[in-house]
Amino acid sequence: MAIQTYQALLARQDSVERVRKMRQAIERAGGRMVIESPTPMGMVVITLTLPDPYHPRDFFPDLPFYLS
């Protein structure tokens, strides 16, 4: 099974909370989520590791996740 890692850099706290609420769904799909502490400027790096055929858009269609 192929695994892909994606990252997003989010500034909006409501977007970070949306991601946080999907942790169980991502783990059920065989994925993993890491949410880093905010930077001094308030930016939060989120890393998703997902097995094929999953993609971040399956969980967050409007958030900017990119292959890392």
Image (cartoon, grey):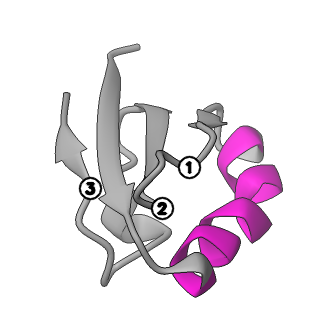
Mark 1, residues whose alpha carbon is within 10 Å: few (<14), some, or many (≥20)? some
Label annotation for residue 38: 1
Q: Position of residue 51 (x, y in %)?
A: 44, 29
Outermost residue, top side: 1
Q: Residue 3, relative to residue 41: is it above or below?
A: above
Position of 7 with respect to 21 (left or right) is left
Q: Are marks 1 and 2 in contact (CB under 8 Å)?
A: yes
The residue labelled by disc 2 is 42
Mostly what secondary structure, the magenta segment?
Answer: helix
Residue sitting at 66 percent across and 49 percent down? 26
Q: Residue 27, relative to residue 59: is it above or below?
A: above
Q: Amino acid at mark 3?
A: Phe
Question: What whole-number distance in Å separates the C-alpha atoms at marks 2 and 3?
Answer: 18 Å
Mark 1, secondary structure of its residue: loop
Quadrant into which the N terminus falls = top left
Residue sitting at 82 percent across and 53 percent down? 24
Q: Amino acid at mark 1?
A: Pro
Q: Is residue 49 magenta?
A: no
Instruction: Decide which of tag 2 and tag 3 comes sooner along the chain.
Output: 2
Mark 2, secondary structure of its residue: loop
Image: magenta residue range: 14-27
Q: Residue 13, relative to residue 9: is it above or below?
A: below
Instruction: Decide which of tag 1 and tag 3 comes sooner along the chain.
Output: 1
Position of 18 with respect to 60 (left or right) is right
Outermost residue, left side: 67
The answer to which image quadrant residue 64 occupies is: bottom left
Question: What whole-number distance in Å separates the C-alpha atoms at marks 1 and 3?
Answer: 17 Å
Residue sitting at 56 percent across and 49 percent down? 38
Viewer-side label of 2, 3: 2
Mark 3, secondary structure of its residue: loop
